[in-house]
Image: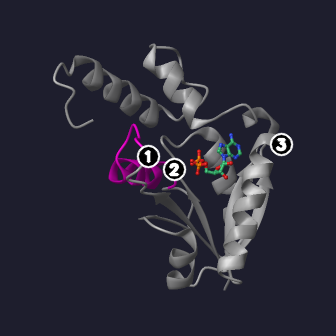
Amino acid sequence: MTSAIYPGSFDPVTFGHIDIIKRASKLFDTLTVSVLENKAKSSLFSADERVKMLVEVCSDIPNVKVDSFSGLLVDYVEKNNFDVVIRGLRAITDFEYELQMAQTNRKLLLQADTVFLTTSLEYAYLSSTTVREVAAFGGDISLFVPKLVADRIYEKFRIKNGDQNGGKD
Ligand code: ADP
């Protein structure tokens, strides 16, 4: 049994991530998509909200589980005995960072081998950051994320924009 983990921020999950999830799920017996809860980084959605959206968008893929973690990826990999870490590569700009991360992780934990899947060309431009930016100005994000995700993004911005007190979001 080969188990893979696909870690990321997924803030929010996009069609680019979903494409990687579907393809990786065919290569390994189990795939755990895991949301990194990074308290130092401000995010649009809480880790719980990101997990919920991932559970919904992955519900039709039988060997995919969704989880979250905080702290070092290698600690999480070791604790859960994952065989492979999956990452997606869009452009050369991803490559430098991803190569450094993969090598660092392997130095820290030999077991933490990274497998890179290159983006499908139709999603090469797509990132969570641009989705958030377009949605913040009310732009159309239907080509970037599933409808249930788009609805929650717009709702989140409605709450944010209506929140005069700079509330917890
Ligand atoms: P990060 O973990 O750097 O915050 P994300 O959570 O957005 O990034 O993405 C998690 C992983 O998915 C990364 O390996 C990233 O390169 C990859 N990824 C993101 N968007 C795409 C896309 N459109 N096509 C392929 N891979 C992608």
Residue at 66 percent of width and 81 percent of height? 109
Q: Quadrant of the C terminus?
A: top left
Mark 3 closeness class: few <14, some 14–19, many ≥20 residues within 10 Å: few
Please tell me the numbered disc located at residue 41.
1
Please tell me the numbered disc located at residue 130.
none
Front residue (pair 123, 160) = 160
* Image coords of residue 156 (percent x, y): 33, 29
Q: On the image, numbered disc 3 is attached to which residue?
A: 92
Is residue 114 placed above or below 2 in the rendered structure?
Answer: above
Q: Distance between the residues labelled 2 and 3?
A: 20 Å
- Sequence-first tag of 1 and 2: 2
Q: SS at mark 1?
A: loop
Q: On the image, numbered disc 2 is attached to which residue?
A: 9
The answer to whether mark 1 and mark 2 are in CB contact below 8 A is: yes
The image quadrant of residue 145 is top right
Is residue 54 placed above or below 91 in the rendered structure?
Answer: below
* Image coords of residue 118 (percent x, y): 80, 50
Q: Which amino acid does label 3 sit on?
A: Ile
